[in-house]
Image (spheres, rainbow, N blue to C red):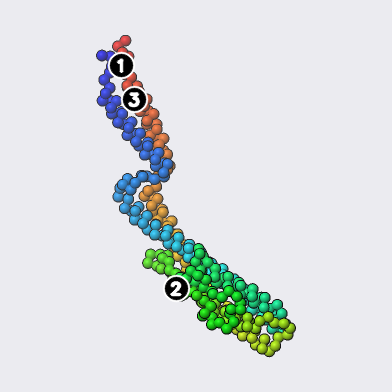
Amino acid sequence: MNRVSTFQLTTAMSRGIERTQQNLANAQMQFNTGKKTQDYSGLGAEAIRSLSARSVLVRQQAYTSSAGAVTTTLELYDAHMSNVETSMGNLRQQIYDALALDSGLDLYPQVEGAFSDFRNALNNTENGKALFGGAQTGDPFLLNTLGETVGINPDDAFANDQIRNRARLGDGLDVEYGIVATDFGKNFVSAFGTLAALGPLDGALSDTDRATLKTALEQIDAGLSEVRAVNGENGRKLAYVDTLNTRAEDRIMLLETVVGKVEDADLGRVAIDITHYKTMLEASYSVFSTISGLSLTNYLR
């Protein structure tokens, strides 16, 4: 026999190399995923803390998602009511101009244009659902032409209901929101009915024409007061939702930090460990190769 017995030593070294290989594989997995472990069992007692934080985190993310959807709807309300206010404000000025000039020439086309703007705003949709319809899916404003406003009861011009939306934007916090066409549209329908009944005007205004135009102005003013009040409340609700959304986003940042401290690997430390384990393996391979090649022949010369 000319070999040196190295069985026990090589066996121990093989096991050590396997452990180092496993440590290297774990470190490389941490570096690639950015996580300390791939399942919660590897976190030990910290798993409960992580799962609890994640549960709250998911709720807060749902709140921010809901707040985003509500904000979009409130901004659409604002845009369309602002359009109505602008259009009816312009019509109001044109009526004042007609009274000042004692001439209603070209006024009727302006009335028709304002009616079209009003109808389009009220019947606008969001994701296929009437924006100002409440729970109804069809058009909340039923009239298609200016002439249909003559003699109509304003209540009969609308098909919306009074159902409002609700959204959960915080723990135990439900926010009601929603605007329907009848909240600000009735006085404008009355004004359009008054002006449509007057019809196109030619030449100088009669006393009756002037009285009718003044009645229409009163109705428009009442409508403008309503739409401004409703939109003002909408603006306050928008600011409130924004505050709740900011609060949820702040909590998300805090919870992500908590989860990160438990689950995220220290990549700087991991990179050092990878280098360390690679160096150990290279040294182990070299020593293992040397020991495996030992022979008495090298010493019996």
Element on which disc 2 rests: loop
1 or 2: tag closer to the N-terminus: 2
Q: Position of residue 272 (x, y in %)?
A: 41, 38
**Percent coordinates x, y for residue 59 in the rendering:** 39, 59
Picture mark count: 3
Please name the residue that numbered disc 2 is placed on: 163
Left or right, 218 with reference to 202: left
Quarter of the rendering occupied by the C terminus: top left
Q: Residue beneath label 1, please? A: 295
- Judged from the image, the secondary structure of the residue bearing numbered disc 3 is helix
Mark nearest the camera among 2 and 3 is: 2
Query: Percent from the top left, x then y, of residue 45?
Result: 30, 50
Q: Which mark is residue 71?
A: none
Q: Residue at x 40, y 38 (%)?
A: 28
Q: Residues within 10 Å of mark 3 (few under 14, many from 20)?
A: some
Residue at the image point whose x is 42% and y is 58% from the top: 61
Q: Amino acid at mark 1?
A: Ser
Asked if labels 3 and 1 touch by Cβ distance under 8 angstroms, the answer is no
Answer whether residue 10 is visible to the viewer in this image: yes
Classify mark 1: helix, strand or loop.
loop
Left or right of residue 75, residue 173 in this image: left
- Between residue 260 and residue 112, name the one nearer to us: 112
* Disc 3: which residue: 288
The CA distance from mark 2 to mark 3 is: 80 Å
> Between disc 1 and disc 3, whose residue precedes?
3
